[in-house]
Amino acid sequence: MVDRSHTIREITNNIPTILNLDHKKMFLREVLMQEVEEVVMSMPKGEAPRLDGLTIDLYKICWSFIKDEVRALMEESRVN
């Protein structure tokens, strides 16, 4: 896992007028599995959330196998 905390801090420190304290707190909190699952399951069929062309249908079908990895990715990408 690559430590991006320094880069993220540098970026967020340069945009303080865009994010207020409440927004910053929101980015610092834990990403909950329920939130990730709700987003994935609410996406319309046939949509490709990434440039690889894999549609959300595949994510939904394989959700029980990949949900922990997807949540871990979301958690890793949050601001620390």
Image (spheres, rainbow, N blue to C red):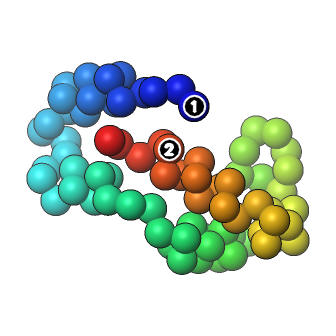
- Name the disc covering residue 16, or none: none
Which corner quadrant of the image does residue 63 belong to? bottom right
Q: Position of residue 1 (x, y in %)?
A: 57, 31
Residue 62 appears in the figure: yes
**Image vertical order of residue 45 relative to residue 5, above or below:** below
Residues under labels 1 and 2: Cα distance?
9 Å
- Label 1: which secondary element: loop
Q: Position of residue 49 (x, y in %)?
A: 71, 52
Q: Which residue is mark 2?
A: 76
Q: Are marks 1 and 2 in contact (CB under 8 Å)?
A: yes
Q: Residue at x 19, y 25 (%)?
A: 14
Foreground mark, 1 or 2? Answer: 1
Report the side of 49 relative to 26 (left or right): right
- Amino acid type of the residue that numbered disc 2 sits on in the rendered structure: Glu
- Amino acid type of the residue that numbered disc 1 sits on in the rendered structure: Met
Residue 46 appears in the figure: no
Q: Position of residue 4 (x, y in %)?
A: 43, 27
Q: Residue at x 79, y 72 (%)?
A: 64
- Residue nearest the viewer, comparing 18 with 75: 75
